[in-house]
Amino acid sequence: MRRFLTLRWFRYHLMMILLVVAFLALGWWQWTRGEGGNARSYGYALEWPAFAIFVVVFWIRLMRDELKPPRADDAAAEASDGAGGEPAEPEFPDVVRPEIDPATDPELAAYNDYLARLNAGAKRK
């Protein structure tokens, strides 16, 4: 629980408290306007507390996500991004790539050669 006492989390806690107080105050203000004869304000008076509830739910979810251990997929992705290496090519074992005969479809073969050159150039960078 000490991780929730850092400066970053202090900002989150402060922002959550300020938003909830502001939304509840705005709800109360709309309620008093509704009592003054503005019937539409009653709808807004119910809407602002709903926003405050949303902020609390989001804050709790943010804390729960912080406590969860990272998944293996996420850890592998972060490791490959931080290493500065090339991202791994996706593997599609079920995909069958047909061989293209340049004699039957020269336009498609030329286009595939063009794509292969682009791919080779992108890998060098």
Image: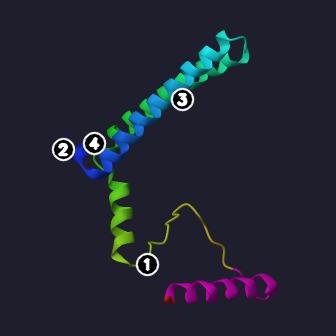
Q: Which residues fall within the magenta stretch?
A: 100-123
As measured in the structure, the alpha-carbon distance from the residue carrying label 2 to the one carrying label 3 is 28 Å
Q: Residues within 10 Å of mark 3 (few under 14, many from 20)?
A: some
Q: Which residue is mark 1?
A: 86
Q: Which residue is mark 3?
A: 51
Of helix, strand and loop, which one carries label 3? Answer: helix
Of tags 1 and 2, which is closer to the observer? Answer: 2
Tell me the amino acid under the disc marked 4. Answer: Leu
Query: Taking 55 as reference, is 45 left or right?
Result: right
Tell me the amino acid under the disc marked 1. Answer: Glu
As measured in the structure, the alpha-carbon distance from the residue carrying label 1 to the one carrying label 4 is 30 Å
Q: Which residue is mark 2?
A: 2
Residue extending furthest toward the left: 2
Q: Which mark is residue 67?
A: 4
Cβ–Cβ below 8 Å for labels 3 and 1?
no
Give the quarter of the image for residue 57: top left
Of tags 2 and 4, which is closer to the observer? Answer: 2
Q: Is residue 70 above or below residue 51?
A: below
Query: Taking 28 as reference, is 60 left or right?
Result: left
Residue at horizontal 49 percent and vertical 66 percent from the top:
91
Q: Is residue 65 above or below residue 54?
A: below
Count up the numbered dots: 4
Give the quarter of the image for residue 41: top right
Q: Is residue 16 above or below residue 83?
A: above
Residue at horizontal 33 percent and vertical 75 percent from the top:
83
As measured in the structure, the alpha-carbon distance from the residue carrying label 3 to the one carrying label 1 is 43 Å
